[in-house]
Image (cartoon, rainbow, N blue to C red):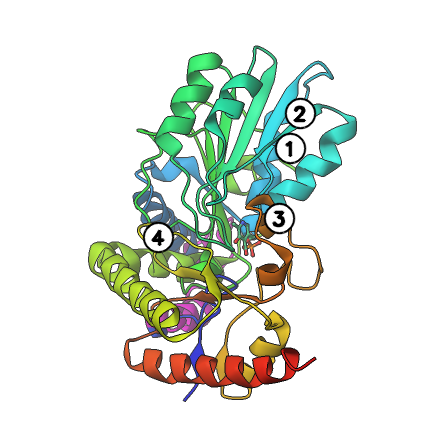
Amino acid sequence: MIVYLDNSATTKVRDEVLKDIIDINENYYGNPSSLHRMGLMAEKKIDEARKSAAKLINAKAQEIYFTGGGTESNNIAIFGHITNSDKHNNIITTKIEHPSVYNVFKQLEDKFSVRYLDTDESGKINTSMLNDMVDENTLLVSIMHVNNEIGIVQDLNEIKDIIKGKNKNTKLHIDAIQSYGKIKIDVNKLSIDTLSFSSHKIHGPKGIGGLFIRSGLRINPLTYGGGQERGMRSGTENTPGIIGFGKACELIYDNFEEETERLYSLKNQYIKRLTEEIEDIKINCPIDGGAPHIINVSFKDVPGEVLLHSLEGKDIYVSTGSACSSKSRDNRVLNAVKLSREYQTGTIRISLGHFNNFEEVEYVIENIKHSVKDIRSITKRG
Ligand SMILES: Cc1ncc(COP(=O)(O)O)c(C=O)c1O
């Protein structure tokens, strides 16, 4: 039995999505910019996918731009908001952002005053700090909705009230890559200006993502060329990727509440058994609420990497943090939530998706118990 529990890193493509990708490659391979029927057929398919992607966040289809993935969407949005601005301006983000936002802000430190928000020990951002930071020169605030490592969900309603209350011209960008399709988002109610999302986190294909840009907002593109995606992302469209992504969105929309409930129950089951059956652990994700699919747990006296490989030996796949940060020793997110060193090193993330089920729980928990016991018998001896 293979138990894949690394769905926050990426997911397996659903069969219905695969079927559509094959169909597009076989039957709709025209260039959507071509004027003949083959081109128009491909363009029509893309328009349908755009509607499906928009529906999940209550946006209009024309507010959705397809990109090469979540990282690209974040880059287009952030750079797009700040072009033509001067040094007196400031931009704000958090200390727990994904590198595709955090490293862009780091890069911008020599051009702007860059402000980083702290979080509390659960990962919630410090809203009084946000209130103090936003001023008449704040161009942009970029905040992730769900953190990819610890699953904390930010209160976007409160955040937008603070920002827009202090400066109605400050733009709000949301990295929704871990929440899109899992938590209901209404870009209108939340006054979001731009929001990024990604296909491969929701059982769609890799290398395709999207950016919501509120109607009327001027964002400068990063690339210039043939003017595809209404000038926002030049280059021949990844038609199979877009259609596959659209299908993945449709499948989620049709079954949103049931699937979210199912993931929450599964998550609770894992947390319950971990806490009841293993000593000296710390649950770093919210126990009630939080994202439905992310469990983050630390084991004292257990190097996370050793545990990961021990579980891999049983065909159970987890991660030690986010796939992007797993190779760096220092974990920025766990530092921000002040997790002590003795627990930090023993941290794994179990992230759930559509293909996970309750039958797997017993197998996974039993194997974690055995692995932890074995590893501790060595580390504690030393
Ligand atoms: C919160 C968050 N933002 C951005 C990204 C980057 O998305 P992509 O892999 O589509 O570039 C990820 C991927 O792990 C993520 O979890």
Q: Nearer the viewer, mark 2 or mark 4?
A: 4
> In this figure, which residue is indicated by the disc labeled 3?
335
* Marks 4/3: CA–CA distance: 28 Å
For label 4, the crowd category at 10 Å Cα-Cα, with few meaning under 14, some 14 to 19 and many 20 or more, is many
> Mark 1 touching mark 2, by CB under 8 A?
yes
Badge 3 element: helix
Q: Main secondary structure of the magenta part?
A: helix
As for residue 265 lying within the magenta part, the answer is: no
Q: Amino acid at mark 1?
A: Phe
For label 3, the crowd category at 10 Å Cα-Cα, with few meaning under 14, some 14 to 19 and many 20 or more, is some
* Marks 2/4: CA–CA distance: 30 Å
For the C terminus, which image quadrant? bottom right
Q: Amino acid at mark 3?
A: Asn
* Marks 3/2: CA–CA distance: 32 Å
Residue at figure coordinates x 46%, y 21% from the top left: 163
> In this figure, which residue is indicated by the disc labeled 4?
181
Indicate the position of residue 217 as horizontal and vertical percent values: 48, 24
Establish whether ligand 1 lies closer than 8 Å to the Cβ of label 1.
no
Residue range in magenta is 16-39
> In this figure, which residue is indicated by the disc labeled 1?
79
For the N terminus, which image quadrant? bottom left
